[in-house]
Amino acid sequence: MALRARQVSRWCCLLRAARPAEFPRRLSGRSSATQACPEATRLALPPAANAILTWRWQACRHVSVGSCSPAGSAKDGSFSSPQSSLPSPIKEEEAKAETLPELNAEIQCEDWEDIPPSSALDLISEEEAVQIVAEPILPLRSSTLRDYVDYSETLAKLVQLGVDLSQVEKRQKAGQLLLTLDFEKDIRKILLFLKDVGVEDNQLGPFLTKNPFILAEDLEALETRVAYLKSKKFDEADIAQMVSRAPYLLLFSVERLDNRLGFFKNELGLSVKKTKDLVIRLPRLLTGKLEPVKENLEVCRSELGFQRKEVQQIAFKTPKILTASKKRLRQTFDYLHNVMGIPHSMLTRFPQVFNSKLLRIKERHMFLKFLGRAQYDPAQPSYISLDQLVSLPDEVFCTEIAKASMQDFEKFLKTL
């Protein structure tokens, strides 16, 4: 009896929770008892639900009456099962109900399914229209990285570091590379490596602007190249200076770096220590092309008339001569040697004169010649060294070397 009471109570609760309109989806068909009674079609509930209500009412009466007598007893004194008096359709419905999931959960899901999806053609109020924010469309193709900064966290953080994207995009495939990299996964480890090498925080932006391709390099390969430089007795300060001044240096493999060092050592006849000092002062010698260097060395020997030992001294004191323009090198030498009368020995002693502008040399020499002070022989009085001729500022040159005023020098330049 207790079992039947719990079942009836459960059915009553489910009946109260369910809406009448949901029963056609719950029950597959009408019961035979409802089909036999045409009056049931006038009710608000569907026939199958009406039959269940009729059975529940009878079951409730049976429970209330039977509670005064032993469960399962009949008038003839025979014992029958509590479920033997239930109609067979009702038994099937009860069996189905035992295996059904929570009715309330299904009803809630079906309520959500009944909500029609919104359409772009639905009418909205002016207040809702004002609140709509139209996001800009990401361009599929663009000639500038500026169009992607708002969509790419990587580009946004690189800009914060000081990377000039307008310069980066001028390098072939550099822009596509940055768009494929993830800042946290690909770039952060390279930045930490550069800081460990010695690149300052304020130099990271300019460094990546010149060499964005280092972001695609394998970290282990970069560490191997730094280890090679350390094995060649370059200290940490030297490596930091070389990497900062020649951003492409770490893109070169160990074999290429070793070949470059060997080339300058053998071609110039320098010692290991002097070779190291040479590339520390001008590290782009290791990253630039070797053909211009070979051509300049040949020009100095065959055209300008310097001896091999003199070329070695000139290149070691002024490494920029190795990468200078051949035309400029010829013109400067021609004016110094043939016009001013400077011998090879003096040019070897002061090779920095080749790095000066030819116009500056001409203006000052002509002014000194106008004043009668153009004396470049160290054995003569009022000697003027080539270093003083080209390195001093105009004011100091006028007062200390030319012994004239700045106004006199400016007036003289107007006559040229």
Image (cartoon, rainbow, N blue to C red):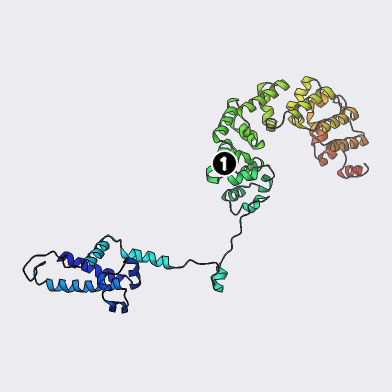
Residue drawn 57% across the image and 64% down it: 133
Residue drawn 52% across the image and 67% down it: 119
In this view of the protein, can residue 304 be seen by the observer? no
- Image quadrant of residue 321? top right
- Residue 224 left/right relative to 78: right
Q: Of 349 and 77, which appears nearest the observer? A: 77
Q: Of 345 and 172, which appears nearest the observer? A: 172
Q: Is mark 1 on a helix, strand or loop?
A: helix
Percent across and percent down for residue 304 are 84, 25
Task: Specify the farthest residue to the front.
Answer: 36
Residue drawn 55% across the image and 69% down it: 121
Position of the C terminus by quadrant: top right
- Image quadrant of residue 139? bottom right
- Residue 406 left/right relative to 281: right
In this view of the protein, can residue 183 be seen by the observer? yes
Above or below residue 285? Residue 20 is below
Q: Name the residue under label 1.
A: 191
Percent across and percent down for residue 328 are 83, 33
Percent across and percent down for residue 215 are 59, 40
Q: Of 135 and 230, which appears nearest the observer? A: 135
Please state which amino acid type lies under the numbered disc 1: Leu
